[in-house]
Image (cartoon, rainbow, N blue to C red):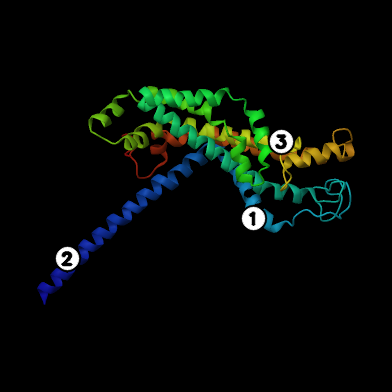
Amino acid sequence: MSEANDTFTGGSSIERESARSQSDLYRERLDRYVLTPFRVVWSDWRTRLGTLIILFYIFVGTVGVRLVDPPEVGGPRLAGIFEASGYPLGTNNLGESLMASLVHATPPMLKMILAGAVFATAIAVVLGTVSGYKGGTVDAVISTIVDIAMTIPGLPLIILIVVTFEPSSPYLIGIVLSINGWAGLARNIRSQVLELRDNSYVEASRIMGRSLSGIIFDDILPNIMPFVLISFVNTARAVIFGSVALYYLGILPVSFNNWGIMLNRAYSTGGAIYSWDSVYWVVLPMVTIVMLSFGLVLFSQGTERLFNPRIRARHAETIDDTTPMEK
C-alpha cells in the first residue's frame, strides 16, 4: 500500500512539474508576443496617441455604424453644428445628418486602407526580399518588372481602370488605388536585403544548411520590419488621399458614403468654401481625413521600437535584457 502511495505521489509530482512547465511556457509566450509589444507601444506618447486615434476610427467603423442610423433626407436643411436637435454636427442642403454621413463613410474607408496597404506591402516584401537575397537571374528578372511598374504613370492608370471597370467593392477600389504603389517599396526593400544577406549571422545560417524560407523569415524580415511598417502606413495614407480625391472629382462610382463625396457636395451644391454659413460642411470631412492620417503617422513613428531587441527586453518580464533576445 505504501509503495502504491509512493508511486502515486511520484506520478503526481511529475504531472505537477509538467503542468508548471507548460504554464510557464504559456506565460512566457503571452509576455513576449502580447504584453511586451503592448508595453513598448504604450511607453511612447506618439505611438500611444496614434494607436488611440486608430482604435477610435475602428470603433466608429464597427460599433458606431450600429449606433447611428444611416443618413436620410428630410431633416432641417443646412442646420449648423448643435443648432438642431438630433443633428449634433449639422445637416446638408438635403437635410441629411453630417454625423451619420461621417460615421457610415468610415467602414468603406477602413476596408480600402486595409486592402490597398496589404496588397502593395505584401507584393513589395516578397519581390524585394527574393530579388535582393537570391541575386543573379532572379534579381535581374524581378528588377526589370519593378522598373517597368515604376515607369507606368500611376494616376492615369488608376483613372483608366476605374472608368473602364467601375469597381464598387471598397476592397477592390483599395487594390486599384495601390496598383503600382508597390514598385518603389520593392526597390527599397531589395537594397536593404542586399546589405543584410552578407552579414555574419546570415552567412552562418547558410553554412548550417538552413532553408531559404527559414533564413528570410528569421534573419532577414525582422531587420526590415520597421521600414516595412512605416511603408505600410504611408501606403494607407496614399489610399486615403487617393480615394478622397477621386470621389471628390466624381471619377469613382458613388456606391457608398465617402468623405470625398461630402467635400464634392459641400463645394458644388452648398458653396461651403464661399459662405461662412455652410463652411462646417466642408470642414468636418477635412478634419476627419486629417485626424486619421495624423494617427497613422504617429503610430508609424513609434513602431520601429517594436522590433528593437533591447527595447523589447527592457519591457519584458521573461527576457533578460543583458543578453540578446532569443528567437
Q: Nearer the viewer, mark 1 or mark 2?
A: 1
From the viewer's perspective, is residue 127 above or below residue 100?
A: above
Left or right position of 141 against 121: left
Secondary structure state at the residue bearing disc 1:
helix
Q: Quadrant of the C terminus?
A: top left
Which is nearer the N-term, disc 3 or disc 2? 2
Q: CA distance from mark 1 to mark 2?
A: 53 Å
Mark 1 residue type: Val
Picture residue at 67% right of the left edge, 33% below the top: 160
Q: Which mark is residue 10?
A: 2
From the viewer's perspective, is residue 209 above or below residue 106?
A: above
In terms of image quadrants, where is residue 210?
Answer: top left
Secondary structure state at the residue bearing disc 2:
helix
Picture residue at 58% right of the left edge, 34% below the top: 179
Picture residue at 79% right of the left edge, 38% below the top: 264
Which percent across, then down, holds residue 77? 89, 49
Mark 2 residue type: Gly
Q: Is residue 177 visible?
A: yes
Q: Quadrant of the N terminus?
A: bottom left
Q: Nearer the viewer, mark 3 or mark 1?
A: 3
Mark 3 residue type: Leu
Q: Which mark is residue 63?
A: 1
The residue singled out by tag 3 in the image is 246
From the viewer's perspective, is residue 96 above or below residue 147?
A: below
Which percent across, then down, holds residue 150? 55, 24
Picture residue at 53% right of the left edge, 31% below the top: 182
Q: Depth check: 298 or 114 in front?
A: 114
Q: Depth check: 111 or 67 in front?
A: 111
Q: Which mark is residue 197?
A: none
Rate crowding at label 3 as few (under 14), some (14 to 19) or many (20 or more) other CA atoms within 10 Å.
some
Q: Residue furthest bottom?
A: 1
User: Badges 3 and 2: C-beta atoms under 8 Å apart?
Assistant: no
